[in-house]
Image (cartoon, helix red, strand yellow):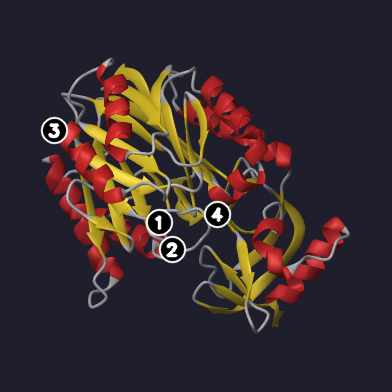
Protein backbone atom coordinates (compact mmCIF):
# COMPACT_ATOMS: atom_id res chain seq x y z
CA UNK A 1 0.00 0.00 0.00
CA UNK A 2 1.33 3.42 -1.00
CA UNK A 3 -0.14 6.84 -0.22
CA UNK A 4 0.46 10.26 -1.77
CA UNK A 5 -1.12 13.69 -1.32
CA UNK A 6 -1.23 16.88 -3.33
CA UNK A 7 -3.03 20.24 -3.29
CA UNK A 8 -3.76 23.06 -5.69
CA UNK A 9 -5.26 26.52 -5.34
CA UNK A 10 -5.55 27.15 -9.08
CA UNK A 11 -8.77 28.91 -10.03
CA UNK A 12 -9.45 26.50 -12.90
CA UNK A 13 -10.56 23.04 -11.74
CA UNK A 14 -9.12 21.27 -14.79
CA UNK A 15 -5.70 22.82 -14.23
CA UNK A 16 -5.91 22.15 -10.48
CA UNK A 17 -6.49 18.44 -11.14
CA UNK A 18 -3.66 18.44 -13.69
CA UNK A 19 -1.27 19.95 -11.14
CA UNK A 20 -2.33 17.42 -8.53
CA UNK A 21 -2.05 14.46 -10.88
CA UNK A 22 1.48 15.43 -11.89
CA UNK A 23 2.57 15.29 -8.26
CA UNK A 24 0.70 12.05 -7.51
CA UNK A 25 2.15 10.39 -10.60
CA UNK A 26 5.64 11.14 -9.38
CA UNK A 27 4.88 8.66 -6.57
CA UNK A 28 2.87 6.09 -8.52
CA UNK A 29 0.51 5.67 -11.46
CA UNK A 30 -3.11 4.52 -11.54
CA UNK A 31 -4.24 4.90 -7.90
CA UNK A 32 -7.03 2.64 -6.65
CA UNK A 33 -8.70 5.28 -4.46
CA UNK A 34 -8.78 9.08 -4.62
CA UNK A 35 -10.16 11.16 -1.73
CA UNK A 36 -10.76 14.78 -2.72
CA UNK A 37 -11.59 17.64 -0.35
CA UNK A 38 -12.34 21.10 -1.71
CA UNK A 39 -13.95 24.43 -0.91
CA UNK A 40 -17.38 25.50 -2.13
CA UNK A 41 -15.78 27.85 -4.67
CA UNK A 42 -14.75 24.90 -6.83
CA UNK A 43 -16.75 24.02 -9.96
CA UNK A 44 -17.81 20.59 -8.71
CA UNK A 45 -19.04 19.32 -12.09
CA UNK A 46 -15.70 20.12 -13.71
CA UNK A 47 -13.87 18.73 -10.69
CA UNK A 48 -15.65 15.39 -10.85
CA UNK A 49 -15.18 15.11 -14.61
CA UNK A 50 -11.48 15.98 -14.41
CA UNK A 51 -10.77 13.56 -11.56
CA UNK A 52 -12.60 10.64 -13.16
CA UNK A 53 -10.87 11.16 -16.50
CA UNK A 54 -7.44 11.67 -14.92
CA UNK A 55 -7.78 8.66 -12.57
CA UNK A 56 -9.96 6.30 -14.65
CA UNK A 57 -9.23 3.19 -12.58
CA UNK A 58 -9.82 4.79 -9.18
CA UNK A 59 -12.79 4.91 -6.89
CA UNK A 60 -13.38 8.68 -6.50
CA UNK A 61 -14.75 10.34 -3.36
CA UNK A 62 -15.33 14.09 -3.03
CA UNK A 63 -16.53 16.13 -0.04
CA UNK A 64 -16.60 19.90 0.47
CA UNK A 65 -14.62 21.49 3.31
CA UNK A 66 -15.00 24.78 5.21
CA UNK A 67 -12.72 27.61 4.00
CA UNK A 68 -9.69 25.43 3.27
CA UNK A 69 -7.99 22.05 3.65
CA UNK A 70 -4.93 20.60 5.34
CA UNK A 71 -2.34 18.01 4.33
CA UNK A 72 1.18 16.99 5.31
CA UNK A 73 2.33 19.92 3.15
CA UNK A 74 0.48 22.34 5.45
CA UNK A 75 -2.72 24.37 5.71
CA UNK A 76 -4.26 25.91 2.60
CA UNK A 77 -6.83 28.69 3.01
CA UNK A 78 -9.48 29.79 0.55
CA UNK A 79 -10.15 28.32 -2.89
CA UNK A 80 -8.40 24.95 -2.77
CA UNK A 81 -8.47 21.28 -3.70
CA UNK A 82 -6.55 18.60 -1.80
CA UNK A 83 -6.29 14.94 -2.74
CA UNK A 84 -5.10 11.78 -1.03
CA UNK A 85 -4.44 8.87 -3.40
CA UNK A 86 -3.92 5.22 -2.47
CA UNK A 87 -2.19 2.62 -4.62
CA UNK A 88 -2.84 -0.86 -3.26
CA UNK A 89 -2.96 -3.57 -5.97
CA UNK A 90 -3.61 -6.37 -3.46
CA UNK A 91 -6.24 -4.36 -1.60
CA UNK A 92 -9.74 -3.40 -2.72
CA UNK A 93 -11.83 -0.27 -2.29
CA UNK A 94 -15.37 0.71 -3.14
CA UNK A 95 -17.26 4.00 -2.98
CA UNK A 96 -20.83 5.09 -3.51
CA UNK A 97 -22.90 8.28 -3.26
CA UNK A 98 -26.68 8.63 -3.25
CA UNK A 99 -28.82 11.72 -3.64
CA UNK A 100 -31.56 11.27 -1.10
CA UNK A 101 -35.08 10.47 -2.24
CA UNK A 102 -37.63 12.07 0.09
CA UNK A 103 -40.06 9.21 -0.53
CA UNK A 104 -37.65 6.63 0.99
CA UNK A 105 -36.47 6.67 4.61
CA UNK A 106 -32.83 7.66 5.19
CA UNK A 107 -32.01 4.44 7.05
CA UNK A 108 -32.93 2.32 4.03
CA UNK A 109 -31.01 4.54 1.61
CA UNK A 110 -27.94 4.50 3.85
CA UNK A 111 -27.92 0.72 3.87
CA UNK A 112 -28.20 0.73 0.08
CA UNK A 113 -25.20 3.08 -0.20
CA UNK A 114 -23.17 0.69 1.94
CA UNK A 115 -24.20 -2.31 -0.17
CA UNK A 116 -23.30 -0.45 -3.37
CA UNK A 117 -19.89 0.52 -1.99
CA UNK A 118 -19.27 -3.12 -1.04
CA UNK A 119 -20.37 -4.26 -4.50
CA UNK A 120 -18.02 -1.71 -6.07
CA UNK A 121 -15.16 -3.09 -3.99
CA UNK A 122 -15.80 -6.59 -5.28
CA UNK A 123 -16.13 -7.82 -1.69
CA UNK A 124 -19.92 -7.98 -1.03
CA UNK A 125 -20.82 -9.88 2.10
CA UNK A 126 -17.45 -9.23 3.75
CA UNK A 127 -16.64 -6.87 6.61
CA UNK A 128 -14.38 -3.98 5.59
CA UNK A 129 -11.47 -2.90 7.75
CA UNK A 130 -12.61 0.75 7.58
CA UNK A 131 -15.45 2.90 6.30
CA UNK A 132 -15.13 6.57 5.43
CA UNK A 133 -18.45 8.36 5.76
CA UNK A 134 -19.53 11.75 4.49
CA UNK A 135 -23.09 13.05 4.62
CA UNK A 136 -24.73 16.42 4.18
CA UNK A 137 -25.80 17.96 7.52
CA UNK A 138 -28.54 16.40 9.62
CA UNK A 139 -28.31 12.73 8.64
CA UNK A 140 -25.37 11.49 10.64
CA UNK A 141 -26.89 9.55 13.56
CA UNK A 142 -29.41 7.76 11.32
CA UNK A 143 -26.68 6.75 8.88
CA UNK A 144 -24.41 5.42 11.65
CA UNK A 145 -27.30 3.34 12.99
CA UNK A 146 -27.99 2.01 9.50
CA UNK A 147 -24.34 0.95 9.07
CA UNK A 148 -24.38 -0.84 12.43
CA UNK A 149 -27.68 -2.56 11.57
CA UNK A 150 -26.43 -3.68 8.16
CA UNK A 151 -23.08 -5.06 9.30
CA UNK A 152 -24.13 -6.37 12.71
CA UNK A 153 -20.91 -5.16 14.37
CA UNK A 154 -19.05 -1.90 14.86
CA UNK A 155 -16.49 -1.31 12.11
CA UNK A 156 -13.96 1.54 12.45
CA UNK A 157 -15.44 4.63 10.82
CA UNK A 158 -13.88 7.96 10.04
CA UNK A 159 -16.27 10.59 8.81
CA UNK A 160 -16.97 14.25 8.41
CA UNK A 161 -20.11 16.14 7.48
CA UNK A 162 -19.85 18.11 4.24
CA UNK A 163 -19.23 21.80 4.91
CA UNK A 164 -19.33 25.13 3.14
CA UNK A 165 -17.83 28.50 4.02
CA UNK A 166 -20.73 30.11 5.88
CA UNK A 167 -23.35 27.46 6.82
CA UNK A 168 -25.41 28.52 3.80
CA UNK A 169 -26.10 25.15 2.15
CA UNK A 170 -23.31 25.33 -0.45
CA UNK A 171 -21.83 21.95 0.55
CA UNK A 172 -21.59 18.97 -1.79
CA UNK A 173 -20.54 15.34 -2.21
CA UNK A 174 -19.60 13.34 -5.29
CA UNK A 175 -18.23 10.04 -6.53
CA UNK A 176 -17.44 8.77 -10.03
CA UNK A 177 -21.05 9.24 -11.19
CA UNK A 178 -23.11 11.40 -8.82
CA UNK A 179 -22.99 14.93 -7.39
CA UNK A 180 -25.38 15.97 -4.61
CA UNK A 181 -25.96 18.65 -2.00
CA UNK A 182 -28.32 16.33 -0.09
CA UNK A 183 -26.94 12.85 0.23
CA UNK A 184 -24.69 10.18 1.67
CA UNK A 185 -21.22 9.01 0.67
CA UNK A 186 -19.42 5.88 1.87
CA UNK A 187 -16.14 4.23 1.00
CA UNK A 188 -15.17 0.76 2.17
CA UNK A 189 -11.52 -0.21 2.65
CA UNK A 190 -10.02 -3.68 2.36
CA UNK A 191 -6.38 -2.53 2.56
CA UNK A 192 -3.17 -4.53 2.75
CA UNK A 193 -1.96 -2.32 5.59
CA UNK A 194 -3.18 -2.41 9.14
CA UNK A 195 -5.11 0.52 10.55
CA UNK A 196 -5.30 2.24 13.91
CA UNK A 197 -7.73 4.94 14.92
CA UNK A 198 -8.69 7.53 17.53
CA UNK A 199 -11.67 9.82 18.14
CA UNK A 200 -11.34 12.55 20.78
CA UNK A 201 -12.87 15.76 22.01
CA UNK A 202 -10.05 17.00 24.22
CA UNK A 203 -12.49 19.05 26.31
CA UNK A 204 -13.01 18.61 30.08
CA UNK A 205 -16.26 18.50 32.02
CA UNK A 206 -16.78 21.57 34.22
CA UNK A 207 -18.97 19.78 36.79
CA UNK A 208 -22.15 21.53 35.63
CA UNK A 209 -24.80 19.16 34.27
CA UNK A 210 -28.55 18.74 33.77
CA UNK A 211 -30.95 16.27 32.20
CA UNK A 212 -32.38 16.95 28.75
CA UNK A 213 -36.07 17.01 29.62
CA UNK A 214 -37.47 18.20 26.28
CA UNK A 215 -36.00 17.84 22.80
CA UNK A 216 -37.39 18.40 19.30
CA UNK A 217 -35.13 16.97 16.60
CA UNK A 218 -31.78 18.68 17.03
CA UNK A 219 -33.19 21.49 19.18
CA UNK A 220 -32.56 21.09 22.90
CA UNK A 221 -35.59 22.79 24.41
CA UNK A 222 -35.29 22.19 28.15
CA UNK A 223 -32.68 21.21 30.72
CA UNK A 224 -34.09 20.10 34.07
CA UNK A 225 -37.44 21.53 32.96
CA UNK A 226 -36.04 25.00 32.25
CA UNK A 227 -35.42 26.70 28.87
CA UNK A 228 -32.12 25.29 27.65
CA UNK A 229 -30.71 28.60 26.41
CA UNK A 230 -31.29 30.23 29.81
CA UNK A 231 -29.60 27.35 31.63
CA UNK A 232 -26.68 27.49 29.21
CA UNK A 233 -26.38 31.28 29.61
CA UNK A 234 -26.21 30.89 33.41
CA UNK A 235 -23.52 28.18 33.10
CA UNK A 236 -21.53 30.31 30.64
CA UNK A 237 -21.65 33.36 32.92
CA UNK A 238 -20.55 31.31 35.93
CA UNK A 239 -17.58 29.89 34.00
CA UNK A 240 -16.44 33.03 32.19
CA UNK A 241 -17.89 35.99 34.05
CA UNK A 242 -19.36 37.11 30.72
CA UNK A 243 -22.86 37.42 29.29
CA UNK A 244 -23.12 35.31 26.14
CA UNK A 245 -24.25 37.05 22.95
CA UNK A 246 -27.06 34.88 21.57
CA UNK A 247 -26.46 36.40 18.13
CA UNK A 248 -22.91 35.01 18.21
CA UNK A 249 -23.69 31.73 19.99
CA UNK A 250 -21.90 29.52 17.45
CA UNK A 251 -18.60 31.35 17.87
CA UNK A 252 -18.81 32.07 21.59
CA UNK A 253 -19.78 28.50 22.53
CA UNK A 254 -16.79 26.88 20.78
CA UNK A 255 -14.81 26.62 24.02
CA UNK A 256 -17.92 25.70 26.04
CA UNK A 257 -19.90 23.02 24.19
CA UNK A 258 -22.27 20.47 25.68
CA UNK A 259 -21.21 16.87 26.13
CA UNK A 260 -22.69 13.48 26.88
CA UNK A 261 -20.61 10.78 28.52
CA UNK A 262 -20.12 8.00 25.97
CA UNK A 263 -17.92 5.65 28.00
CA UNK A 264 -14.84 5.47 30.14
CA UNK A 265 -11.36 3.99 30.01
CA UNK A 266 -9.41 3.32 33.22
CA UNK A 267 -12.20 5.07 35.16
CA UNK A 268 -11.74 8.22 33.03
CA UNK A 269 -14.95 9.30 31.26
CA UNK A 270 -14.96 10.42 27.63
CA UNK A 271 -17.61 12.50 25.94
CA UNK A 272 -19.36 13.12 22.64
CA UNK A 273 -19.75 16.85 22.10
CA UNK A 274 -22.61 18.94 20.70
CA UNK A 275 -21.95 22.48 19.47
CA UNK A 276 -24.64 25.08 20.31
CA UNK A 277 -25.43 26.98 17.12
CA UNK A 278 -28.56 29.14 17.39
CA UNK A 279 -30.99 30.17 20.12
CA UNK A 280 -34.50 29.25 18.96
CA UNK A 281 -37.50 31.53 19.41
CA UNK A 282 -38.62 29.58 22.51
CA UNK A 283 -35.18 29.76 24.16
CA UNK A 284 -34.11 26.34 23.01
CA UNK A 285 -30.68 25.64 21.51
CA UNK A 286 -30.30 24.36 17.97
CA UNK A 287 -27.38 21.95 17.74
CA UNK A 288 -25.30 20.20 15.06
CA UNK A 289 -25.97 16.81 16.65
CA UNK A 290 -28.87 15.13 18.41
CA UNK A 291 -29.30 14.94 22.17
CA UNK A 292 -31.92 12.46 23.37
CA UNK A 293 -34.48 13.21 26.08
CA UNK A 294 -33.33 11.72 29.37
CA UNK A 295 -29.61 12.07 28.61
CA UNK A 296 -27.42 13.91 31.09
CA UNK A 297 -25.84 16.94 29.46
CA UNK A 298 -22.54 18.32 30.77
CA UNK A 299 -21.04 21.74 30.21
CA UNK A 300 -17.56 21.16 28.78
CA UNK A 301 -14.63 23.53 28.55
CA UNK A 302 -11.53 23.84 26.42
CA UNK A 303 -8.82 26.34 25.53
CA UNK A 304 -7.48 27.79 22.31
CA UNK A 305 -4.10 26.20 23.04
CA UNK A 306 -5.79 22.82 23.40
CA UNK A 307 -7.48 23.17 20.01
CA UNK A 308 -4.08 23.84 18.41
CA UNK A 309 -2.24 20.98 20.08
CA UNK A 310 -4.86 18.25 20.22
CA UNK A 311 -4.76 17.31 16.52
CA UNK A 312 -1.24 16.03 17.06
CA UNK A 313 -2.30 14.33 20.29
CA UNK A 314 -5.13 12.48 18.57
CA UNK A 315 -2.72 11.21 15.93
CA UNK A 316 -0.39 10.14 18.75
CA UNK A 317 -3.31 8.30 20.33
CA UNK A 318 -4.04 6.51 17.07
CA UNK A 319 -0.38 5.53 16.86
CA UNK A 320 -0.51 4.18 20.41
CA UNK A 321 -3.61 2.17 19.50
CA UNK A 322 -1.41 0.18 17.12
CA UNK A 323 -0.03 -2.42 19.54
CA UNK A 324 3.20 -2.96 17.56
CA UNK A 325 3.92 0.81 17.33
CA UNK A 326 4.60 0.60 13.60
CA UNK A 327 5.49 3.74 11.71
CA UNK A 328 2.45 5.10 9.81
CA UNK A 329 2.66 5.29 6.04
CA UNK A 330 -0.21 7.78 5.87
CA UNK A 331 -3.51 8.79 7.33
CA UNK A 332 -6.84 10.57 7.19
CA UNK A 333 -7.95 13.09 9.79
CA UNK A 334 -11.17 15.05 10.28
CA UNK A 335 -11.02 18.40 12.08
CA UNK A 336 -14.11 20.34 13.13
CA UNK A 337 -14.81 23.53 11.18
CA UNK A 338 -15.91 25.29 14.36
CA UNK A 339 -12.54 24.59 15.96
CA UNK A 340 -10.77 25.58 12.74
CA UNK A 341 -12.51 28.96 12.67
CA UNK A 342 -11.55 29.58 16.30
CA UNK A 343 -7.83 28.87 15.76
CA UNK A 344 -7.55 30.01 12.16
CA UNK A 345 -4.44 32.13 12.78
CA UNK A 346 -2.65 29.07 14.20
CA UNK A 347 -3.63 26.46 11.61
CA UNK A 348 -0.09 26.22 10.28
CA UNK A 349 0.88 25.11 13.80
CA UNK A 350 -1.98 22.58 13.80
CA UNK A 351 -0.70 21.14 10.51
CA UNK A 352 2.87 21.04 11.82
CA UNK A 353 1.78 19.23 15.00
CA UNK A 354 -0.10 16.66 12.95
CA UNK A 355 2.79 16.14 10.56
CA UNK A 356 5.20 15.61 13.44
CA UNK A 357 2.89 13.06 15.07
CA UNK A 358 2.41 11.40 11.67
CA UNK A 359 6.19 10.98 11.34
CA UNK A 360 5.87 13.24 8.27
CA UNK A 361 3.87 10.60 6.40
CA UNK A 362 1.24 11.90 3.93
CA UNK A 363 -2.15 12.77 5.38
CA UNK A 364 -5.25 14.72 4.44
CA UNK A 365 -7.70 16.63 6.63
CA UNK A 366 -10.89 18.52 5.73
CA UNK A 367 -12.77 20.91 8.03
CA UNK A 368 -16.28 19.57 8.59
CA UNK A 369 -19.64 20.42 10.19
CA UNK A 370 -19.69 17.22 12.25
CA UNK A 371 -17.29 14.39 12.93
CA UNK A 372 -17.79 10.65 13.08
CA UNK A 373 -15.41 8.09 14.53
CA UNK A 374 -14.85 5.14 16.81
CA UNK A 375 -13.78 5.69 20.40
CA UNK A 376 -11.14 3.37 21.83
CA UNK A 377 -13.92 1.81 23.90
CA UNK A 378 -15.56 0.67 20.66
CA UNK A 379 -18.47 3.12 20.46
CA UNK A 380 -19.27 4.69 17.08
CA UNK A 381 -20.55 8.25 17.40
CA UNK A 382 -21.30 11.53 15.66
CA UNK A 383 -20.24 14.66 17.47
CA UNK A 384 -19.11 18.25 17.04
CA UNK A 385 -15.84 20.00 17.88
CA UNK A 386 -14.17 16.58 17.63
CA UNK A 387 -11.20 15.21 15.74
CA UNK A 388 -11.11 11.77 14.17
CA UNK A 389 -7.98 10.08 12.83
CA UNK A 390 -7.14 6.84 11.05
CA UNK A 391 -3.57 5.76 10.34
CA UNK A 392 -2.29 3.13 7.93
CA UNK A 393 0.78 1.16 9.05
CA UNK A 394 3.57 -0.26 6.95
CA UNK A 395 3.41 -3.86 8.22
CA UNK A 396 1.13 -5.63 5.77
CA UNK A 397 -1.51 -8.20 6.61
Q: Is residue 251 above or below residue 235?
A: above
CA neighbours of label 4 inside 10 A, class few (<14), some (14 to 19), many (20+): many
Q: Nearer the viewer, mark 3 or mark 4?
A: 3
The Cα atoms of the two marked residues, 1 and 3, are separated by: 26 Å
Lower position in the chain sequence, tag 4 or tag 2: 2
Reading the image, the residue beneath label 1 is 171
Outermost residue toward the front? Answer: 11
Lower position in the chain sequence, tag 1 or tag 4: 1
Mark 1 falls on what kind of element? loop
Location of the N terminus (image quadrant) = top left
Mark 2 falls on what kind of element? loop
Q: In the image, what residue occupies the spot 81% across and 69% down? A: 234
Q: Nearer the viewer, mark 1 or mark 3?
A: 1
Location of the C terminus (image quadrant) = top left
Q: In the image, what residue occupies the spot 53% across and 71% down? A: 292
Reading the image, the residue beneath label 3 is 57
Reading the image, the residue beneath label 4 is 384
- Residue 211, given in percent of the width and then of the height, sits at 66, 72
Mark 4 falls on what kind of element? loop
- Residue 57, given in percent of the width and then of the height, sits at 13, 33
Q: Determine which of the numbered discs, if any, sits on residue 169 in the image.
A: 2
CA neighbours of label 1 inside 10 A, class few (<14), some (14 to 19), many (20+): many
Q: Residue 53 occupies which quadrant of the picture?
A: top left
CA neighbours of label 3 inside 10 A, class few (<14), some (14 to 19), many (20+): few
Amino acid sequence: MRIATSSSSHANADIAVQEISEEIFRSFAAPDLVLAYYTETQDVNTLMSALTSTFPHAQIVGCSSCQGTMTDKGYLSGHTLSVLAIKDPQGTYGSAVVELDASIDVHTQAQEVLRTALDNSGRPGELPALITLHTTPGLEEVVLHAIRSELGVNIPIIGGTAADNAIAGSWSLFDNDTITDNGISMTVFFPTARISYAFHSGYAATGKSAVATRVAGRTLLELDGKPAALVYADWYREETGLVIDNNALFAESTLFPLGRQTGEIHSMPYYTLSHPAVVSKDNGIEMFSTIQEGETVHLMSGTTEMLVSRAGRVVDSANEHDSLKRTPIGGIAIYCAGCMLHVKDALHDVAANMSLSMHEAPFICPFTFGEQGQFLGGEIAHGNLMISAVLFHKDEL
